[in-house]
Amino acid sequence: MNDKLKPELMKLLGITDEKVADKVLYYAKLVNDGATTMLVNSGQKQEAKKLLDDLKANDFAVAKALNERTVSIIDMVASAYQSSSFEAMSIDVQKLNKCYVLIVNELKKIYARNEQLADISFSPAWKHFEIIEGDEWEINQYIYQNQNDAGQQHNAQVNKLCIISGVETPKYTPSLKQIIEDTDEVISAYRTELKELKRKNATNERNWHIPDYKLTYSLDGTILVNGVLKLKKVHAGSAPDKLMEQATKQPNAVFKPELGQTARNLSTTLSSMGFSGTLRALFFPSVSKDKGILFRPSISRATADSERLDTTDLDLQLKELGANTKLNPMDIPF
């Protein structure tokens, strides 16, 4: 109940007159202190108390949203340096660091005026790391060596406060809304760049390959790639079910499927089952409304290479799921 609340109260309620804000805070102080006075009627006191409760509840919701983003950033940086510090060092973290610093700054202000947040026993990582740039390896050690979390336990307690207060969707000031949007964009860009870097490294260093790609379709609607990768299960009698039944009966031949009454075209039907990108290029390389489709239940490594299909991500996914692999010829031990 002090001047720390005034700027946030004015922003939240759209108050431009500081005297009005002072009056609201004064009423709220009387309410919280249990004071009684003829100068403040019960209606005014109740209104003031509600305004302060709304401000506090919104603080909890905003804190939860900001904490979620610090958790994402800490987790990403720690994970990057856990798998390959040299790769991660090549990624510029200045934009990520800027967003992180701004978010931590906002969190500090919110926690300074809310004892319930400040008193949470589980300490978030942002209280240990005010910046990202230059602290990447220390962050990695904090998470993996010392077995701390990135703030998940702390934010679970913040979420509890949100639930109790009845406000889980935050109201942002324009400036804070911009910080949130910028942060989400930067997090997405960093995650994409790190994923691509790891992908390239895995491709350059791996000494194995997937010898062939095989697709099977079961009577219960299960579609499997190499016996391990399960695509979307189809329902009996549906357009995808009819397509797969006809395709498995006419392998390696172009045909025009009969799908019955459906608003979906062939391409949309295939996409709904998970056949897009590399998977479609492998198993349904030709899809035409006029000519029909070509289904290949099995494709060799040599065929995939001759068609210049990029199977890198699919190969890694299949290997992680336990698909059969072979060593590259040059890497076979003698």
Image (spheres, grey):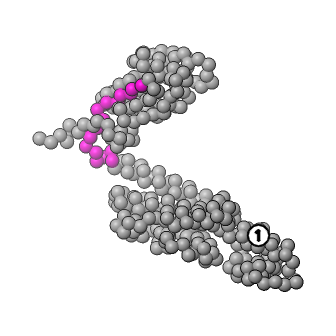
Residue 268 location in percent, x, y?
56, 28
- The answer to whether residue 275 is above or below residue 164 is above
The residue positioned 43% from the left and 29% from the top of the image is: 223
Q: Give the x, y percent position of residue 224.
A: 40, 31
Region rendered in magenta: 202-218
Whether residue 106 is in magenta: the answer is no
**Side of 265 relative to 171 (left or right):** left
Q: Residue 239, position in %: x, y?
A: 55, 23
Q: Nearer the viewer, residue 309 or 172?
A: 172
Q: Is residue 272 visible?
A: yes
Q: Is residue 262 above or below residue 276?
A: above
Q: Quadrant of residue 37?
A: bottom right
Name the residue nearer the viewer: 35 or 298: 35
Is residue 177 visible from the viewing direction of this image? no
State the quadrant of the N terminus.
bottom right
How many other residues sit within 10 Å of disc 1, few (<14), some (14-19) or many (≥20)? Answer: few
Q: Vertical placement of 310 versus 196: above or below?
A: above
Tell me: residue 105, above or below residue 228: below
Q: Helix, strand, or loop for circle 1?
A: helix
Quadrant location of the C terminus?
top left
Residue 213 colored magenta? yes
Residue beneath disc 1? 50
- Residue drawn at x 39%, y 36% is 229
Q: Position of residue 74 (x, y in %)?
A: 46, 63
Please name the residue shown 49% across and 64% down the image. Answer: 153
Position of 100 compared to 8: left or right?
left
Amino acid type assigned to the residue bearing label 1 in the image: Lys
